[in-house]
Image (cartoon, helix red, strand yellow):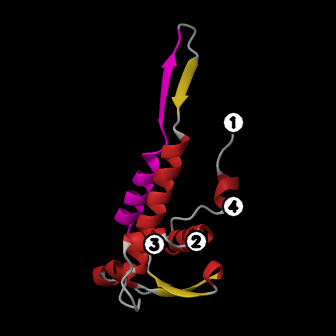
Amino acid sequence: MAILTKNQILQGINQITKVKIEALDGELWLRPLSSAEVNEILNIEAQGYGTINANNNARGQTQAEGKMNLAKMQEKQAEAKYTAIHKSINNDKSSDEWSYEEIKDLPSNAIDEIYNKIMELSGADVTERDVKQFPED
C-alpha cells in the first residue's frame, strides 16, 4: 500500500465523477464535499430540528419535552440539499455554472437523487448496514 502525500489527500474533493441521475435521464459531473462542507450541510439541517429540554425529576427519572416546527424543518432540509448540490455541481468539469436559484427549480425527485449521490460520494451517506449496526435499547 502506497503512502499518500498531503497534496493527494487534499485533492480528494477534486475527484469529480460522472454520475447517472435517473430522475433527469442523464449524467452530471459531481464532486465530493469536504468534511467542512458536509458539516456545514448537517448544521443547516440541524437548524430545523427544534429544541428538546430534558430534566431529571426527584425520583431520578428523565423527563423530556420537545418542540418541533415541521415547516422550518422541511425548509432547512431543502436548504441543505440546495447548498450541497450548488457546491458539488459547480466544478471544473461542469459545462455550465449553476446558480442557487436554478438548482431550486429542479424537480424534487432530481434534488433528492442528486443530494443522495453527493453524500455518497462524500462518504457521508447512511446505509442500511449503518442503521442495523446502530445500538437499540
In the image, which is nearer the foreground, mark 4 or mark 3? 3
In the image, which is nearer the foreground, mark 1 or mark 4? 4
| 20 relative to 78, above or below | below
Residue tagged 1:
137
Q: What is the C-alpha distance between the residues marked 3 and 1?
A: 41 Å
Which quadrant does the C terminus fall into?
A: top right
Range of the magenta residues? 33-57
Residue tagged 2:
107
In the image, which is nearer the foreground, mark 3 or mark 1? 3
Q: What residue type is disc 4 on? A: Glu
Image-quadrant location for residue 10: bottom left
Residue tagged 3:
103
Secondary element under disc 3, as helix, strand or loop, is helix
In the displayed structure image, the side of residue 126 where residue 128 appears, left or right: right
Q: Are marks 4 and 2 in contact (CB under 8 Å)?
A: no
Q: What is the C-alpha distance between the residues marked 2 and 1?
A: 39 Å
Which of the numbered marks, if any, corresponds to residue 128?
4
